[in-house]
Amino acid sequence: MGKRVFSFIIIISVFTSAVFAQKTTLLYAPDDDGKVFTSIEEALKAEKPVYRLKITKLANKDSLPEELFWLTELRELTVKGCKLCRLNQSIGKLSHLQYLNLDHNKLLRLPETIGALRDLRTLVISRNILEELPESIGNLHQLVTIDAWGNPLYVLPHSISDISNTLKILDLRQIPLTKWEYEAMEQLLPKTDIQFTNICECENRRDHD
């Protein structure tokens, strides 16, 4: 009897998890079927608006193909593990984006045009080589999460304080912050959960321009 009850609980748990996973897929329009496109070529041939695009391979690592920015209805864009060196200025054309994932590339900076993404709620820029965020980050008043762990990001632009009421999470794990750097970030974002691994015992001040 005990085994049968245990099996029943497992079945219920799996079923519940499956239902929950389905519910977490956010549909953006009546014609949105939840499809995630995995190539720009495929997306450009679609007869309906494209809301999600996930890219894991790029022929040209220098930048994204400009044709991508014709997909102006995009709500979710993932460019992950592509060794991308530069994010195009044209990113600002994707004004409906709510989720932008640029994890595990080789980005040195983000363009100021990212500030045109006024609907953006989640920005994932972890595992790049970013030393700074653009001043236009302060324009993103819908932004709730910045995942930036693993970057040499020791200072934040003063403009980020303009979104201190909406930004809930700033993930800076795996970044050896000094006490001075962390406190400076806290002053800019007093209501934000700034996540960090530890405060390093290195020099309390770095040379920041």
Image: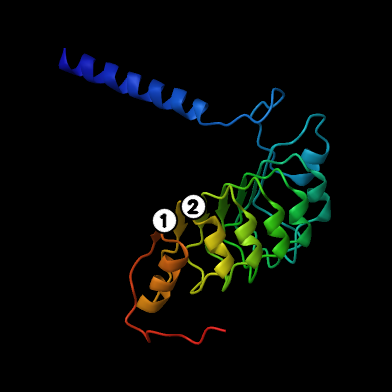
* Few, some or many residues within 10 Å of mark 2 (<14, 14–19, 20+): some
**Residue lying at 38% horizontally and 87% vertically, measured from the top left:** 203
Residue 21 screen position, x and y as percent: 48, 29
Say what secondary structure mark 1 lies in: loop
**Mark 1 touching mark 2, by CB under 8 A?**
yes
Residue furthest to the top: 1
**The furthest residue to the left:** 2
Dividing the picture into quadrants, the one containing residue 202 is: bottom left
Please determine whether, in this image, residue 131 is positioned above or below residue 116. Answer: below
Q: Position of residue 161 (x, y in %)?
A: 52, 62
Nearer to us in this view, 116 or 163: 163
Question: For the residues marked 1 and 2, what is the alpha-carbon distance in whole angstroms?
Answer: 7 Å
Q: Is residue 146 above or below residue 5?
A: below
Q: Name the residue under label 2.
A: 165
From this view, report whether residue 192 is shown above or below residue 197. above
Q: Where is residue 200 in the image (x, y as percent from the top left)?
A: 34, 77
Q: Residue 191 carries which label?
A: 1
Residue found 77% across the figure and 39% down from its top? 43
1 sits to left or right of 111: left
Which quarter of the rendered picture does the C terminus lie within? bottom right
Kind of residue indicated by mark 2: Asn
Asked where in the image residue 98 lies, by quadrant, the reply is top right
Q: In this view, does 129 lie above or below 74?
A: below
Residue at point 78%, 51% (across, down)? 93
Q: Which of the two labelled residues, at mark 1 and mark 2, occupies the earlier sequence position?
A: 2
Q: Residue at 74% across / 55% down in the picture?
A: 91
**Label 1, residues with CA under 10 Å away: few <14, some 14-19, many ≥20:** some
Quadrant occupied by the N terminus: top left
The total number of labels drawn is 2
Residue type at numbered disc 1: Lys
